[in-house]
Structures are given as structure tokens and as C-alpha cells.
């Protein structure tokens, strides 16, 4: 029985696909093992959102060879689609599979025997066309990432995703409901809907046939799922109808992650984004009107070409005044073959870092303020398997990270708690009702 290990870089979508590929190996009689367990085969699922992701891939290959010098190494994912020839030159790599080929890995590479040169299976991204590969993660955590959409039609000036994953496409709602029912039969308690641009859900065979609002309404009726979360959704696609439904739904968490990218309308235009900051502020206000204590996360890119100090301060002031809960901050990273890579006004790395650091400090202040607003309230925590120094951790429906004394009977359970205090680590300590403590 050959042993295979998968390592995933990047987003929740990649995790859902890696888990699905792992199940393919298991069905063929392979044993899926941890990365450090001297596997015969390594599958490295790559990201290419930033240049750091490219370098991480090379580092993982080096580490794999230290663990199992004779192992077969296959590279899949976005980096593999964008730069297959570059990856094939990395010492130790045996196969490179692009977007249309990664789910056919067992068909294309059947012997997994090392060869003098890496074999490349990467067709042009246009060949992906309207084909959608179903995927969901399972077995590695208390929550499942369910892939509901792939590809993107937006072509933002900084982004390689359309080149790496192709056009926006989706399965049918009925098929996703069936997948959710299968997930409900497992011990996964929370489902995170993931994709590249999930608000654009519903493009089937190249034309819009269904809508995201109808998907979440259908999923909300699936019995056996404890909680859903919507992953990142574009502000122009987050309608009041979606917000209102989440506010009154049975199972959807009051938690939104909405990419902003810049608080300067000038920079948003250079990024080819499809909204201005006024629309973003209106979306946040709408969420607060329906769900005053909802968690709202924000993606921001700093140091974009042409972003001067006033543009950055415009973003800082906008976010400082906006009632959001935390920020994910990314220094701008040049990506080959994107319009932004050739734009004038490139900033030094140290200046990008300075701006990112300023926003990360602001994020910590925002998160602390959000947590303080939750104190004294009752919430439901899904506890995870992670244990550290006798403590266990989990998240509330509002995405507050909580800490409690470890109890094996509470792992992967929804537990009613009262949010008591914020500790030195920035986690919220909780008080549990007597029935939870006595099981």
C-alpha cells in the first residue's frame, strides 16, 4: 500500500479540493498519511496570489525531499497552471498538473515512478471551459469547506485567478443540496461555502441560470448541518436580500467577509474593482441595520502602484471610521501578466510593509473593540480538537475566538456559553452552564 501526503497552500477552496483528491487516493487503495510520515508520494496544492506563495511551494518541495528523498512529488493548483515550466525545473519535482488536469492525477500519473525529467500536464486555461469539479473538505477539522463556485469573470488588475482558474462557473443548486446532505451524515458540524467569487454563483454552461440567494435558501433547509458560513463575497454582489435572509435564517452565521482592497476611489478604479467605497459603506450599514452584532471582516491591499500617502491615509481613515470587526491586510505583490504589474508608481517594499503594519495595528484595535461588545452575551461555540496547555478553543456564530478548559466530551460540539472576559492572548474566556459542565 503506497502512502501519500497532501500539503495545501492558499485558500479554503484549495483545502476543499485537496481533501477531495485525498479521498480519490483512498478509494484507489492508497493510504493518506501526514506530511512528516515518510510518504511515497507528495501532492503539493499551490496558490499564486502573491510571490510569497511561489516561494513557499519551492520550500515545501525541499522539506519533502528531506523527509523522503526518493518520494514522487506532484505539484497541482494555481501556480502549476500559471508557471508549469518554471515548476518543472525545481529539483525533485516529478509531475506538474494544471487546472484541467489536477482531478485526473490518478489517471494521468498511474505508476508514480520517478523520471529523469518532470512531466507536465497543463493545458491552456480555456480548456477548463464550463466544467465544474465538485469538492469539499472532510476529516481534518470540525468544519467543512464546500466548493460552490469556481473561476472569475472580474479581471481585477492585480489578480491572476482568472488565468489560473478560468471563467466563473457553478454546479446546480440541486447537486450542492445533495452534497450538503452527504456532509450532514458525517461528523462535520459547520459548513463554509467557498469559491473564487461565490456571489457570482449560478453561471452554468456559460450563462446565468441560478442565483446565490436561492442557493443559500435551499441549503438552509438541509437537516443535520449545524451552521453555515459564507466565505469572502464581493460587496457589489452582497445584496440586501442576502443580508436580510442571513439575519433570519435557521443556520447561517451572522458573519461576512467582504473584500474592500482600498478605501480610495482613485485606487479602486486603478484596481478595476466594480464599486466605489460609498457602496461598500452602504453594505456595512445594511448589515448593521439587520444584525447589529454581526462580524464583518475586510480584505485590504496596501502599496498598490500609484497609491500615494494621501491615498493610503484615505483608506486608513475610511476603515477607522467603518464599523467592521477585523482586517486581512496584504502588501501589494506584482504578478506577471497582470495590468497592475506594468503600472507606474511602484512603491518600495519597505513602504508597503509600513502601511501594512499600520493597518494590522488598526485591525487588532477593531477586533478587540468587537470582542468587548460581545462580553456578557450568550453565544454558541463550536469547540475544535486543538488543545494547548490544557485549553481548548472554538468560534462563536459571530466568529469570536474563545478559550475554555479542555474537556474531550465538548470537542466538535455546539456548546451554549456566556462570553466573560478577554485574556492576555486576546481570546475570550467563557462561562458554561451547569448542564454543559455535567454533560
Image (cartoon, grey):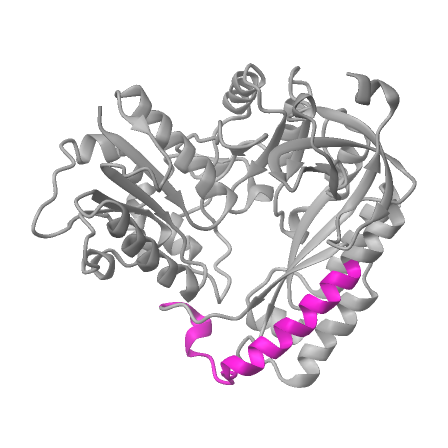
Image-based side of 435 in relation to 118, left or right: right
How far across and how far down the image is residue 349, in percent? 50, 80
Outermost residue, left side? 116
Image-based side of 40 in relation to 52, left or right: left
- Tell me the magenta residue range: 337-366
Q: Residue at x 80, y 51 (%)?
A: 423
**Residue 8 in sight here:** yes
- Total labels: the figure holds 0
Q: Residue at x 38, y 38 (%)?
A: 130
Outermost residue, right side? 376
Q: Is residue 369 magenta?
A: no
Front one among 370 and 241 = 370
**Residue 324 in sight here:** no
From what the image shows, is residue 13 above or below residue 312? above
Locate residue 268: give its quadrant: bottom right
Front one among 164 and 237 = 164
Magenta stretch: dominant secondary structure: helix
Locate residue 72: give its quadrant: top left
Q: Locate the N terminus and report the quarter of the image it occupies.
A: top left
Amino acid at each position: 500500500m503506497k502512502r501519500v501526503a497532501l500539503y495545501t497552500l492558499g485558500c479554503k477552496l484549495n483545502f476543499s479540493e485537496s481533501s477531495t483528491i485525498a479521498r480519490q487516493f483512498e478509494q484507489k487503495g492508497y493510504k493518506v498519511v501526514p506530511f512528516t510520515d515518510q510518504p511515497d508520494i507528495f501532492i503539493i496544492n499551490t496558490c499564486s496570489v502573491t510571490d510569497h506563495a511561489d516561494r513557499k511551494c519551492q520550500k515545501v518541495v525541499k522539506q519533502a525531499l528531506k523527509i523522503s528523498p526518493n518520494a514522487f512529488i506532484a505539484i497541482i493548483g494555481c501556480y502549476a497552471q500559471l508557471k508549469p515550466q518554471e515548476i518543472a525545473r525545481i529539483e525533485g519535482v516529478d509531475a506538474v498538473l494544471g487546472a484541467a488536469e489536477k482531478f485526473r492525477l490518478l489517471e494521468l500519473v498511474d505508476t508514480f515512478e520517478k523520471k529523469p525529467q518532470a512531466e507536465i500536464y497543463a493545458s491552456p486555461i480555456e480548456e477548463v471551459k464550463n466544467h465544474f469539479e465538485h469538492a469539499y473538505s472532510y476529516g481534518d477539522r470540525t468544519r467543512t469547506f464546500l466548493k460552490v463556485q469556481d473561476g472569475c469573470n472580474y479581471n481585477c488588475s492585480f489578480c491572476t485567478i482568472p488565468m489560473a482558474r478560468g471563467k466563473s462557473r457553478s454546479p446546480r443548486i440541486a447537486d450542492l443540496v445533495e452534497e450538503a446532505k452527504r456532509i450532514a451524515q458525517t461528523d462535520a458540524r459547520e459548513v463554509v461555502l467557498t469559491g473564487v467569487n461565490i456571489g457570482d454563483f449560478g453561471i452554468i454552461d456559460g450563462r446565468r441560470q441560478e442565483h446565490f440567494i436561492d442557493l443559500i435558501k435551499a441549503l438552509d433547509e438541509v437537516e443535520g448541518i449545524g451552521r453555515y458560513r459564507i466565505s469572502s463575497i464581493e460587496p457589489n454582489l452582497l445584496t440586501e436580500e442576502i443580508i436580510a435572509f442571513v439575519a433570519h435564517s435557521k443556520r447561517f452565521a451572522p458573519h461576512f467577509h467582504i473584500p474592500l482592497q482600498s478605501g480610495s476611489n482613485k485606487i479602486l478604479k486603478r484596481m478595476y474593482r466594480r464599486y466605489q467605497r460609498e457602496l461598500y459603506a452602504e453594505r456595512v450599514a445594511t448589515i448593521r441595520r439587520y444584525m447589529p452584532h454581526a462580524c464583518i471582516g475586510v480584505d485590504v491591499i496596501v502599496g498598490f502602484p500609484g497609491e500615494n500617502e494621501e491615498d493610503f491615509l484615505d483608506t486608513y481613515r475610511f476603515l477607522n471610521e467603518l464599523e467592521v470587526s477585523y482586517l486581512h491586510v496584504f502588501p501589494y505583490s506584482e504578478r506577471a501578466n497582470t495590468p497592475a504589474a506594468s503600472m507606474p508608481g511602484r512603491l518600495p517594499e519597505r513602504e508597503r510593509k509600513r502601511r501594512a503594519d499600520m493597518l494590522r495595528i488598526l485591525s487588532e484595535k477593531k477586533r478587540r473593540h468587537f470582542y468587548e461588545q460581545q462580553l456578557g452575551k450568550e453565544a454558541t461555540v463550536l469547540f475544535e480538537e486543538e488543545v494547548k496547555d490544557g485549553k481548548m478553543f472554538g468560534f462563536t456564530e459571530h466568529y469570536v475566538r474563545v478559550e475554555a478548559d479542555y474537556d474531550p466530551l465538548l470537542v466538535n460540539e455546539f456548546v451554549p456559553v456566556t462570553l466573560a472576559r478577554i485574556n492576555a492572548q486576546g481570546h475570550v474566556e467563557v462561562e458554561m452552564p451547569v448542564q454543559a459542565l455535567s454533560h
